[in-house]
Image (cartoon, helix red, strand yellow):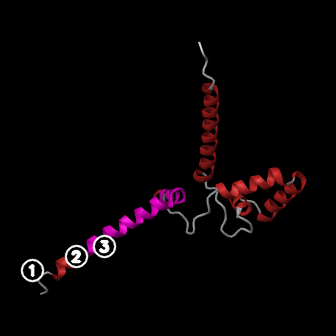
Amino acid sequence: MKRHYGYKRNHTFKRYKRHYKGLRDRLETLASSRGIYRSRSGIFMGVCRGLAEYFNLSVFWVRIITLVLFLFTGFWPVGVMYIVAGLLVKMEPVSPLRDEKDQEFYDSYTHSKQSAIQRIKRKFENIERRIQRMEHTVTSKEFDWK
């Protein structure tokens, strides 16, 4: 009986894909639910300032530690991790989030800007239809102005 060799490779690929998805989900959970954001007022990508604000540390010391690690380990570990963190961690919201509804909208916007824009567009179209109905009612001949 002939053995199929593609099964083992396909199984290995699925295992790595599962591992990557789990790692991505853990990073996403860490970045979104506990409130780690990149700062908008940071020097380079806002990673150090965002970490300092999250852990309530001085930005100066976080930058010094990052610089020392960068000098001693070289570009590969610290530089690449810094760039990856800058790409994966979301920017902090422009205005503070007041409740869960704001947090949900912000998360949906950062994950899919098109769907958030479509949701806003539907809301404004609904408001426009309501205003048109009110205008039609007020300007109709049956409406009494007295």
- Residue receiving disc 2: 134
Query: Horizontal and vertical percent for residue 128?
Result: 31, 73
**Image: 105 above or below 1:** below
- Amino acid type at image mark 3: Glu
Query: Horizontal and vertical percent for residue 87?
Result: 66, 57
Image point 65% across, 35% down: which residue? 16
**Residue 112 among magenta residues:** yes
Marks 1/2: CA–CA distance: 13 Å
- Residue receiving disc 3: 128
**Residue 113 among magenta residues:** yes
User: Which label belongs to residue 142?
Assistant: 1
Which quadrant does the C terminus fall into? bottom left
Please state the extent of the stretch shown in magenta in the rendering: 103-132
Residues tagged 1 and 2 counted as in contact (Cβ below 8 A): no
User: Which label belongs to residue 14?
Assistant: none
> Callout 1: few (<14), some (14-19), or many (20+) C-alpha neighbours within 10 Å?
few
Q: Nearer the viewer, residue 2 or 88?
A: 2
Marks 3/1: CA–CA distance: 22 Å
Image point 64% across, 47% down: which residue? 27
- The prevailing secondary structure element of the residues shown in magenta is helix
Image point 36% across, 66% down: which residue? 123
* View extreme (right): residue: 72
- Amino acid type at image mark 2: Met
Which quadrant does the N terminus fall into? top right
Marks 3/2: CA–CA distance: 10 Å
**Image: 66 above or below 23:** below
Query: Horizontal and vertical percent for residue 79?
Result: 79, 56
Query: Horizontal and vertical percent for residue 141?
Result: 10, 82
